[in-house]
Amino acid sequence: MMIVAMMAMGCTSSQKRKPVFEMPRSAVGDSTIYGLVCDGTNDSILVYLSDPYDGSDPDTLSILEAYKAHKVFGLLRVGDKLAMLRDTADTSRVNMVVVTQDLLGQWCRKMLPKLRRKPGMEGISEEAVLAQLPDSIQQLLKQEKEYGFSLKIDSAALPIGFQLNISSENEDNPLVYDRVKLYRQWCINNGKLLLTEAYTDSLGVQRAVATDTAELVLLARDSLVLRIAGEEQGFYRKADSEE
């Protein structure tokens, strides 16, 4: 309790903030530094306490170059948690900062269905196939569906819209949707957002399937842009029913 009180004294704010959460500790080969934003932080300097707190006074690093390079993701508020990469050539400054609490929440995008290509459609153009479809199916092709993921505390994640995969696997359905990733875990590693797909086995244990490495392009109040496998994907923040 004393440690918590000292941290609160060192980094206080009257602004409403999202709940504080624990980030996973750095893995082997990960140079991410975790901290807590302190009073005195501005566009030129970053004042922070180490996280977990080790009893030391707040440290100060230059953040100006990171701002110029558009490598500050999220809004720095006193008391918020962050993940950062220190400049290896000049340890007095940071190369990248991610306000990890700004990543929390539901991130969604819209997706249009595609027409399922069945055997015998080879050589037939998309326009010709569409012209033969009833109006009801053509209208369905124009209806967007929402999908994405929710980033939770303790590095947990939940997929949004994963039920769309059921219709995609039904061969009788004339429409097909892109596969929705079933993300269950997330973390920051060397400035990248790692999103891990997993499933729950018969014993209730989560088993990792694959991990997508996402490069942060933009993190704003209501917008998130990630670059995954060379492709930029934009998401909007959806109001969380739990908030």
Image: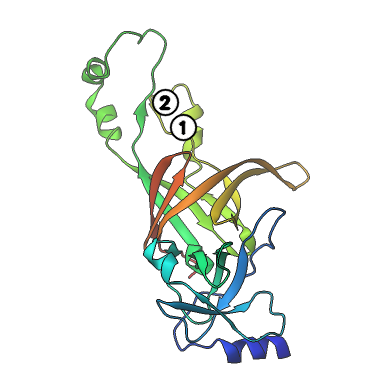
Q: Residues within 10 Å of mark 1 (few under 14, many from 20)?
A: some
Q: Secondary structure at mark 1?
A: helix
Question: How is this picture coloured?
Answer: rainbow
The residue sitting at 61% across, 69% down in the picture is 34
**Residue at point 44%, 39% (across, down):** 230
Residue 58 position in % (x across, y down): 60, 84
Q: Amino acid at mark 2?
A: Asn
Residue lying at the far front of the rendered structure: 89
Determine the image quadrant of residue 175.
Answer: top left
Which quarter of the figure is the N terminus placed in? Answer: bottom right
* Residue 118 visible within the image: yes
Write down the residue under mark 2. Answer: 173
Mark 1 to mark 2: distance in Å?
A: 7 Å
Residue 74 visible in rendering: no
Horizontal placement of 152 versus 3: left or right?
Answer: left
Q: Is residue 120 above or below residue 77?
A: above
Circle 2: is it few (<14), some (14-19), or many (20+) Cα within 10 Å?
few
- Mark 1 and mark 2 in contact? Answer it, CB < 8 Å: yes
Tell me the element at label 2: loop
Residue to which mark 1 is pinned = 167
Vertical side of 167 occupied by 240: above or below = below
Q: Which mark is residue 231?
A: none
Residue 11 vertical placement versus 236 (above, below): below
Image spot of residue 228 (x, y percent): 47, 43
The kind of residue tagged 1 is: Ser
Q: Residue at x 36, y 63 (%)?
A: 222
Q: Nearer the viewer, residue 8 or 142?
A: 8
Of callouts 1 and 2, the N-terminal one:
1
